Image (spheres, rainbow, N blue to C red):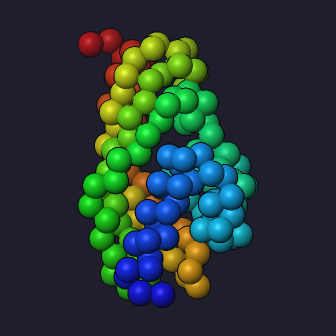
Amino acid sequence: MGAIENKALVRRLFEQGMNERNSEVFDDCVAPQFVNHDLPGPVPGPKGFLESFRSFESAFPDLHIVLGDVLAADDCVVTRSHWTGTHKGEFMGVAASGASVKVDFIDIWRIDNGLLVESWVRMDLLGLMHQIGAFPS
């Protein structure tokens, strides 16, 4: 697959899988051996990826990802984006605050045979925790 197809694969995961909450997309896009090196799922593959996403979704049920830059080279795709949501459930030990959040992130995806096989995510978790009141102002 080339850069155009790889970018489309990542866009599909974010837009249809996460934003539209279409869980079949995870099976279509994520390899059975997939691993996220920074936000690991409880198991590898689509099931683990979906479970990790659902941990965010349960705390921020209106979570919505806004893709910014989507760049591709060789077998990698990099995105610089953000997500928004309302803190309506417990997250990392912090009870629901009702706070609206905006969280920036950058991720790198490695693709093999048309499937996502690895990712690395740099998310502003410190900023998120501040926004939901885990730290005093």
Q: On the image, which quarter does residue 75 sit in?
A: bottom left
Q: Residue at x 49, y 31 (%)?
A: 62
In the image, taking residue 24 as reference, residue 15 lies left or right, namely left
Residue 59 seen in the current view: yes
Q: Residue at x 33, y 33 (%)?
A: 102
Q: On the image, which quarter does residue 118 sit in?
A: bottom right
| Residue 120 location (% of width, % of height) | 45, 60
| Residue 71 location (% of width, % of height) | 30, 70
Eyeballing the image, is 51 above or below 56? below
| Residue 106 location (% of width, % of height) | 34, 54
In the image, taking residue 93 as reference, residue 137 lies left or right, namely left
On-image quarter of the C terminus: top left
Eyeballing the image, is 89 above or below 105? above
Number of marks: 0
Q: Residue at x 49, y 70 (%)?
A: 9
In the image, taking residue 9 as reference, residue 27 lies left or right, namely right
Eyeballing the image, is 81 above or below 63? below
Residue 126 seen in the current view: no
Q: Camera-side residue: 25 or 38?
A: 25
Q: Residue at x 72, y 55 (%)?
A: 47
| Residue 81 location (% of width, % of height) | 32, 51
